[in-house]
Image (spheres, rainbow, N blue to C red):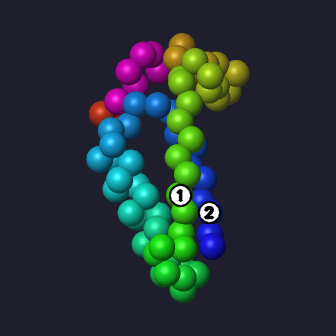
């Protein structure tokens, strides 16, 4: 039973998350030849103030609301 963990910044819509887990599940089913009901996908969301890249918090680097409509 594959368990896939995805870590993303908060701000994605429920519809985006539905599309994400559907795509990941389809890919795992195809790649590993398992049943869809065997695939678990965990989404871990982080506040941008708790995530940094290159030594800079994402809340400082991108501002509040970055990613709320995808990746812009």
From this view, report whether residue 69 is shown above or below residue 52. Answer: below
Location of mark 2 (residue): 3
Percent across and percent down for residue 10 are 46, 31
User: Image quadrant of residue 55?
Assistant: top right
Span shown in magenta? 61-68
Percent across and percent down for residue 48 are 53, 23
The circle on residue 69 is none
Q: Main secondary structure of the magenta part?
A: loop
Q: Is residue 61 visible?
A: no
Circle 1 — which element? strand
Between 38 and 26, the one lying in front of the other is 38
Q: Residue at x 59, y 60 (%)?
A: 4
Percent across and percent down for residue 38 are 54, 74
Q: Residue at x 56, y 30 (%)?
A: 46
From this view, report whether residue 47 is shown above or below residue 7. Answer: above
Picture quarter with the N terminus:
bottom right
From this view, report whether residue 61 is shown above or below residue 24. Answer: above
Location of mark 1 (residue): 41
User: Image quadrant of residue 34?
Assistant: bottom right
Percent across and percent down for residue 51 are 62, 26
Q: Residue at x 35, y 53 (%)?
A: 18
Q: Is residue 6 visible?
A: yes
Q: Residue furthest right?
A: 55
- Comes first in the chain, label 1 or label 2: 2
From this view, report whether residue 19 is shown above or below residue 23. Answer: above
Q: CA distance from mark 1 to mark 2?
A: 6 Å
Q: Is residue 67 magenta?
A: yes
């Amino acid at each position: 039973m594959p368990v896939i963990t995805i870590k993303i910044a908060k701000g994605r819509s429920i519809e985006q998350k539905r599309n994400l887990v559907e795509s990941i599940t389809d890919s795992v089913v195809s790649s590993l030849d398992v049943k869809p009901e065997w695939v678990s996908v965990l989404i871990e969301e982080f506040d941008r103030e708790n995530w940094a890249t290159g030594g800079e918090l994402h809340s400082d680097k991108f501002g509040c609301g970055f990613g709320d409509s995808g990746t812009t």
